[in-house]
Amino acid sequence: MELSKLLRPNIASLAPYSCARNEFHGKQARIYLDANENPFNVPFNRYPDPLQLQLKSSLSKLKGVPAANIFLGNGSDEAIDLVYRCFCRPGVDNVVAIEPTYGMYRVCADINDVEYRPVLLDERFQLNADRLLAATDAATKAVWLCSPNNPTGNSLLHDEVMRVIASFQGIVVVDEAYIDFSAEASLTRLLATQPNLVVLQTMSKAWGCAAIRLGMAFASREIIDVFNKVKYPYNVSLPTQQAALEQLQDPFQTDKWVRQLLAERQQLMQAFGELPITEKVFPSDANFFLTRVRGAQHVYDYLTDQGIVVRNRSRVTLCGECLRITVGTRSENTELIGALRRLG
Ligand SMILES: *Cc1c(COP(=O)(O)O)cnc(C)c1O
């Protein structure tokens, strides 16, 4: 794979903005008069580290990925958008994605005026590599996979994912937002041998940090360097970097939450299976599950009236009459099941 041929020509030749904190590569200075900052109001007066090196060092140890292979953004949504801005010529190139999946891939394609080609999963929400690859052509710059997938909850078949990565000549993005809830290993272990692979993760789910907005992309050094060149200079704020560092000090807390949520999910899925309205409960490797019910809109409205919000996915391809249920605390889940039992 030649990265320079995949990139948009304007990005390949881009001279990036050089911010004050980039140009200063010295050791700790005593006096900073380089960035037109206000010397008062410590610590919020200073621009944050544009490359978030301390945070990357911490993540590097935790994930077993070198810091040079990590991009950090304002949620994984920033990395999703960067794939389009770096690789896809508006009105010319296209991307191929599994369907159904996370809605942001399509929204970002639309925003960037890039053709979006959805390829249906099978009735078990599984990926067929040949069918996906058949939808690609010379103008396909990226393929979107999501495993465990949202809104279906299942992991994609490992062999099929591997065939896509091995066969496709462009960028293969695997969104692992829910990987911490899954028994499957992260594909970050393939980065050293797969220069076309981009793995996305986030602090928004298992780490319980959706509010701080911190997403990660793991990829070859070449791809990470391009993302860093195109991103806004100070894309991750100081409070976000500090909060993330603090949360990363306590991975056992995250493990505990995950174990608890998985136990709750099992109980909740079993309780759903016994409700008269339930037609199907789909298997899940995430902190949510998809269920097909009789009268999804009615059930949704009823729950909303009780102050309980779930996600109505009825209008999503292959998800007719389906609700997506996020696993909550024990008492939240008990209330949900209680309300649905009263519905009869
Ligand atoms: C929740 C989710 C994300 C997280 O996005 P952030 O911008 O990091 O909060 C990414 N991908 C998928 C598939 C998700 O469901």
Image (tube, rainbow, N blue to C red):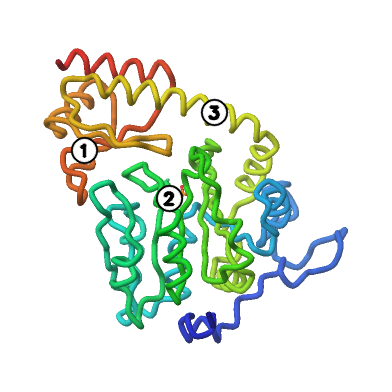
For the point 17% across and 29% down, the residue is: 301
What is the x, y in percent for residue 192?
A: 64, 65
Q: Badge 1: how crowded within 10 Å, few (<14), some, or many (20+)?
A: many
How far is mark 3 from mark 2, CA to CA?
Answer: 20 Å
- Which quadrant of the figure has residue 207? top right
> Any mark on residue 266, and which?
none
Q: Is mark 1 within 8 Å of ligand 1?
A: no
As drawn, the label of residue 322 is 1
Q: In what element is the residue under mark 2?
A: loop
Horizontal placement of 83 versus 332: left or right?
Answer: right
Q: Secondary structure at mark 1?
A: strand
User: What percent of the width, then of the height, locates residue 129?
Assistant: 35, 63
In this rendering, the answer to whether 194 lies above or below 41 is: below
Residue 93 picture location, percent across and down: 34, 79
Amino acid type indicated by mark 2: Ser
Q: Circle 3 — which element?
A: helix
Count of numbered marks: 3
List the residue tagged with mark 3: 257
